[in-house]
Image: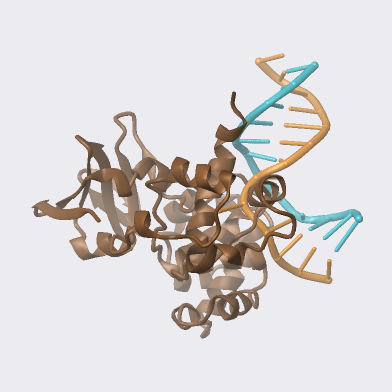
Chain colours: A brown, B orange, C cyan
DNA sequence: GGACAGGAAGTCC
DNA sequence: GGACTTCCTGTC
């Protein structure tokens, strides 16, 4: 495990950084609001707090106005990823795990995860990031941090009051109906906290009640928003990897209770194209 | 350069 | 199985 120390009022340091690789964690497709600047520093917004994250001398630094506990939770720092034993072993998976070492599953805000992964359907990551950013700029709250303006992810209450046509500026296409519908459901008693208390299967079933949420999106929300680590989203990349590098009729449940972490290693590895290079 | 096809962390009917 | 919005990416 890694040591977490408070450097000063608004900065915490994690060392060694081996268990949290910000580049892999932010670029593996699980989140859409962290952006790297030309100096290699990431900025993002979590629960209404902006933050900067960077690596220096084998140490990860996080600077924000939010308390240390928020980051311990968000980065899932209580969990020792290197100590996790997956019941399934295979050459492709072992390579994926080595390649993805340092990825952590972020404990994202539930509504944000739901909304973001509704947007993700049939879309590529750069475009998803663009739509999410426009959603925040148009409907979130402005936050000033170190002289820059950031925007929070808009509340479901805010989105619920809109008509799908009001979302035209974010250019989410046909997903606008789903976004507004999900926001209204959440405001009318569709309880994401309750969903988080359910089993994996029950949570998926519950989420699929929402119009525009199918099995894939539901599993993303389960894993990235509800912190149910057995969530296993099967998208086109995972489908291809399973077909090409795993036994026929392979059951992802073979990865055990942390199947979602395995999924993320495989997704990141498959999408990198690394295994195809000479 | 710009045009064009294919496809993108899918879901619905 | 086709339709759905929009646009990123690779190819010519």
Count of numbered circles on the image: 0
Would residue A98 be found to the left or right of residue A164 on screen? left
Q: Is A246 placed above or below A251 here?
A: above
In front here: A13 or A212? A13
Furthest residue toward left: A8
Q: Please tell me which residue is depicted at 44% across the width and 55% down the height of the picture.
A: A136
In front here: A164 or A125? A125
Q: Is residue A164 shown to the viewer in this render?
A: no
The C terminus of chain A sits in image quarter: top right
Q: Is residue A66 shown to the viewer in this render?
A: yes
Q: Please tell me which residue is depicted at 49% across the width and 50% down the height of the picture.
A: A134
Would residue C4 be found to the left or right of residue A163 on screen? right
In front here: A211 or A75? A75
Q: Position of residue A61 (x, y in %)?
A: 21, 45
The N terminus of chain A sits in image quarter: bottom left
Q: Is A190 placed above or below A40 here?
A: below
Q: Position of residue A187 (x, y in %)?
A: 50, 80
Q: Please tell me which residue is depicted at 69% across the width and 52% down the height of the picture.
A: A239
Q: Position of residue A156 (x, y in %)?
A: 47, 71
Would residue A66 be found to the left or right of residue A80 on screen? left
Would residue A68 be found to the left or right of residue A277 on screen? left
Q: Position of residue A30 (x, y in %)?
A: 48, 53
Residue A168 position by quadrant? bottom right
């Amino acid at each position: 495990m890694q040591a977490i120390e408070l450097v000063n009022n608004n900065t915490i340091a994690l060392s060694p950084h081996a268990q949290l690789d910000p580049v892999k964690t932010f670029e593996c497709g699980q989140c859409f609001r962290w952006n790297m600047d030309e100096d290699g520093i990431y900025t993002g917004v979590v629960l209404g707090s902006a933050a900067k994250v960077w690596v220096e001398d084998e140490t990860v630094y996080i600077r924000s106005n939010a308390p240390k506990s928020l980051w311990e939770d968000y980065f899932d720092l209580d969990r020792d990823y290197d100590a996790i034993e997956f019941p399934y072993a295979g050459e492709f998976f072992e390579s994926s795990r080595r390649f993805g070492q340092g990825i952590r599953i972020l404990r994202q805000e539930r509504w944000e995860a739901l909304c973001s992964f509704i947007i993700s359907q049939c879309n590529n990551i750069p475009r998803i990031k663009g739509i999410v950013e426009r959603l925040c700029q148009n409907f979130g709250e402005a936050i000033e941090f170190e002289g820059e303006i950031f925007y929070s992810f808009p509340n479901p209450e805010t989105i619920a009051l809109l008509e799908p046509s009001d979302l035209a500026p974010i250019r989410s296409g046909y997903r606008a109906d789903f976004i507004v519908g999900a926001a209204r459901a959440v405001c009318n008693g569709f309880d994401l906290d309750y969903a988080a208390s359910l089993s994996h299967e029950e949570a998926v079933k519950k989420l699929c009640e929402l119009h525009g949420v199918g099995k894939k999106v539901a599993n993303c929300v389960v894993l990235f928003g509800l912190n149910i680590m057995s969530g296993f989203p099967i998208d086109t990349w995972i489908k291809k990897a399973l077909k090409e590098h795993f036994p026929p009729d392979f059951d992802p449940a073979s990865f055990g209770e942390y199947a979602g972490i395995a999924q993320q290693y495989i997704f990141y590895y498959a999408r990198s194209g690394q295994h195809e290079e000479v």
